Image: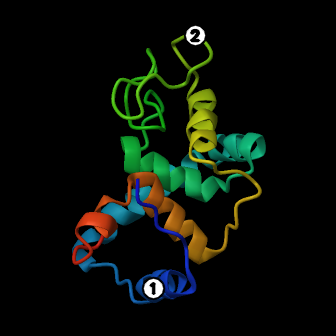
Amino acid sequence: MATIRLSAALRSEYLHLFDSCELRPERTRETEATLQRILAQQTRYQQVEATTGVPWHFIAVVHQMESGGRFDCHLHNGDPLGARTRQVPRGRPRVGTPPFAWEVSAADALAMHGLSADTDWGLARLLYELERYNGLGYRLHHPEVRSP
């Protein structure tokens, strides 16, 4: 399987894209509501950060991306916590008995992705890891399209 490494050029691209982002006025309310939901659960994200070393804000963004911030779903892919994951990645977490606590499943998902306190958590790496978490299919197969 092809892989994409975080090169100097890709770091520069991520930083440029981040610096050039503009919030569309019609998305202001939705963005503010999402931010408030995240901040209301900051302590819960920080519990997972304490276990994994992955910054709470990264976990919060992935949580929104994978399940819309629902705490009854796996961080892996948004499947319900009442069973192991059914979608890709299938069969996670591999240890334990359902139903899974969200924090346990989240720690498993982050470990499965190789994320830990040892990860470089600078802005470019954080953006790279967000794209990698969601999959590099756009970058690999449709480079003319920006990854959502």
Residue 135 relative to residue 44: left or right:
left
From the image, tell me which residue sits under label 1.
13
- Residue 145 percent coordinates (x, y): 23, 73
- Residue 144 percent coordinates (x, y): 22, 78
Task: Give the distance between the C-alpha atoms of the residues marked 1 and 2, in whole angstroms.
Answer: 42 Å
| Vertical arrangement, residue 141 with respect to residue 97, above or below | below
Instruction: State which mark lies toward you, 1 or 2.
Output: 1
Q: Residue at x 56, y 21 (%)?
A: 94
From the image, tell me which residue sits under label 2.
97
Badge 1 element: helix
Q: Residue at x 51, y 68 (%)?
A: 128
- Residue 58 percent coordinates (x, y): 57, 57
Residue 107 relative to residue 134: left or right:
right
Quarter holding residue 135: bottom left
Residue 85 circle label? none
Q: Nearer the viewer, residue 28 or 140?
A: 140
Q: Residue at x 57, y 50 (%)?
A: 59
Q: Amino acid at mark 2?
A: Thr
Q: Residue at x 46, y 53 (%)?
A: 133
Q: Amino acid at mark 1?
A: Glu
Residue 141 relative to residue 110: left or right:
left
- Graded by Cα atoms within 10 Å as few (under 14), some (14 to 19) or many (20 or more), the crowding at tag 1 reads few
Quadrant location, the C terminus: bottom left
